[in-house]
Amino acid sequence: MKKLIDATDDVVVDALRGMALSHPDDLQVDLENRVVLRGRPKEDGKVAIVSGGGSGHEPLHGGFVGEGMLDAACAGEVFTSPVPDQITAAIAAVDRGAGVLQIVKNYTGDVMNFEMAAELADAESGTEVRTVVTADDVAVEDSTFTAGRRGVGGTVLVEKIAGAAAEQGMSLDEVTEIAEHVSSHSRSLGVALTSVTVPANGKPSFELGEDEIEIGIGIHGEPGRRREKIAPAREIARTMLEPILAELPGEGPVLLFVNGMGATPLLELYILAGDAHAILEEAGVEVSRRLVGNYITSLDMAGASITLLRLDERTTHLWDAPVATPALRRGI
Amino acid sequence: MKKLIDATDDVVVDALRGMALSHPDDLQVDLENRVVLRGRPKEDGKVAIVSGGGSGHEPLHGGFVGEGMLDAACAGEVFTSPVPDQITAAIAAVDRGAGVLQIVKNYTGDVMNFEMAAELADAESGTEVRTVVTADDVAVEDSTFTAGRRGVGGTVLVEKIAGAAAEQGMSLDEVTEIAEHVSSHSRSLGVALTSVTVPANGKPSFELGEDEIEIGIGIHGEPGRRREKIAPAREIARTMLEPILAELPGEGPVLLFVNGMGATPLLELYILAGDAHAILEEAGVEVSRRLVGNYITSLDMAGASITLLRLDERTTHLWDAPVATPALRRGI
């Protein structure tokens, strides 16, 4: 294993320390609880948004903390849920008296620990905490770490749009309803070109042949639908978009999110994005907003995912709202 | 070779097409000349800034086109200089009557072609074109593709700071002088953990042992100073910072730029950034600005580079100025 790390046991805390030093004006990092917080906390009376999950998906979630998006992100160990104490510490730090929304990817450990944290926060301080669970991955019905579908790329879109709603002063009911709407109108599929090496394991999580790709991979290297031979990007884009379009609810324009898994160059992501645009145009689907880059990754995995979100006027407006985080910044 | 591409001969034009579709409001792409232009051109009377070079280093340079940074970026084939005709087309498209500054990385082909383009532009339309050549890589004195030092990470900082100066309406003399100052006050060194595979070659450009890293690698996989065994990130950071600090001119605070080569996860870049901060603090060097992420890459190479720029009041102010490009965005 070749990685730029100091000690396999300390990768998360070392990365959080580096993150704090790299963004001293934008972020505060509670190293003890491993919680990333805004440099300038939100005003009283606004809903706060907390997310988090296993590390190894950077910039998700810590890179999305800031004005117009998250108030706090809890970093678990690599590919491991944060514990309830971390999450209650985050909730206590960001509660501004208008309630807290938790955005949680659908993995059994995450869902359990965020639920437990919500109960603890209610019992300890009476904070009203709601939870929206994302489950946008159409690859498999149940998976290694989930009952039901996995939460993947759609999570980024839920965090952006719910974050904008909270920033604009909407109520906990409204912010929760919007987050649920975005979650239920997002569909994703990922492909892996290489495996992923978790630092603590020191070797690749699975083997993939010289000319093989895995269709429907999870963001922890969980198995997908099937393996195929590598093919031109436009065929891979079609393989990804067909099941997504088959399950995407609603009518009208979409947001196209082409996401890199961590080790795939931007050059390739733009080629894939061009192919996805062409396929969607052919299918009569209007792309009205886009996001291309490495936003929800799987350590050193090469590959990409595509997410479609069915937009409406309200979600388009919230997507366009200003945001100022280390990983996503616009209009501020 | 496993890559998300359609045809090895078309990777650059396919990526540019995808880039145009992904940023329809921010960019215009002249596909015939392979030039990336601003969506909203600069006002008359301001200096325009053109850059470019071989493709495969994305987001450099096309991702830095936008308000507060570049006016145009010329994309050559992968790891190959753009040709003079592309560059003269870019100059003609962005000239606003106040002259044009070219920012060129020091590679023989690039320097020659940008110089030829400057002469052609002057002959054809009388446009005054100046050229600043970056050569910040302390790894080797001459290299595979250069007489003198290679231009690497410092180029990003020159583009940002000269771009801000031009946006603020400074004269061609002033913008050129600032670009030269930033270029001469930047020093970089890179390390590779893996090789790089150029699509047209289909196989890795060099071989690196299971536990080996290459110190002083170029952004095209050119050989560095030596090979070493993989070591903790803080030792690698020290190996990079020592020769940089030994050659960094001036006194006072620095900008620390920790850059990923393309296939290294952000988690690792933050660990390296944390280590670099600690080493600089130990050395009594104040870090007053930072940039961490994948900004000048080498296709699918794993690894990182560190650049230090000695700041002063003027360059700090220009670094902080608003910028709105696909890859770097702040304050707009």
Image (cartoon, coloured by chain):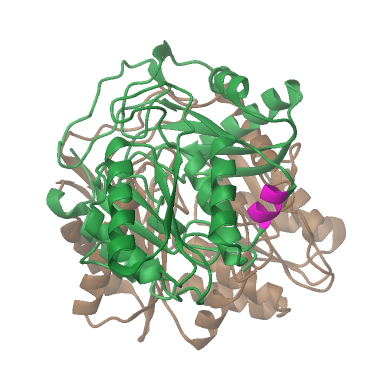
Chain colours: A green, B brown
Residue at coordinates 57% horizontally, 72% vertically from top-left?
Answer: B161
Quadrant housing residue A222: top left
Q: Depth check: A45 or A213 in front?
A: A45
Residue B81 visible from this viewpoint: no
Q: Depth check: B99 or A12 in front?
A: A12
Residue B254 pos. (x, y %): 38, 77
What span is colored magenta in the figure? A314-320
In-image side of B85 versus A30 (left or right): right
Residue at coordinates 34% horizontally, 75% vertically from top-left?
Answer: B248
Residue at coordinates 36% horizontally, 66% vertically from top-left?
Answer: A126
Seen in the picture, residue A67 relative to B84 is either above or below; the reply is below
Q: Depth check: A111 or B237 in front?
A: A111
In-image side of A303 versus B265 (left or right): right
Residue A75 pos. (x, y %): 29, 54
Quick one: quadrant of the C terminus of chain B? bottom right
Quick one: quadrant of the N terminus of chain B? top left
Magenta highlight: main SS: helix
Residue A100 pos. (x, y %): 44, 61
Residue B132 visible from this viewpoint: yes
Q: How many marks?
A: 0
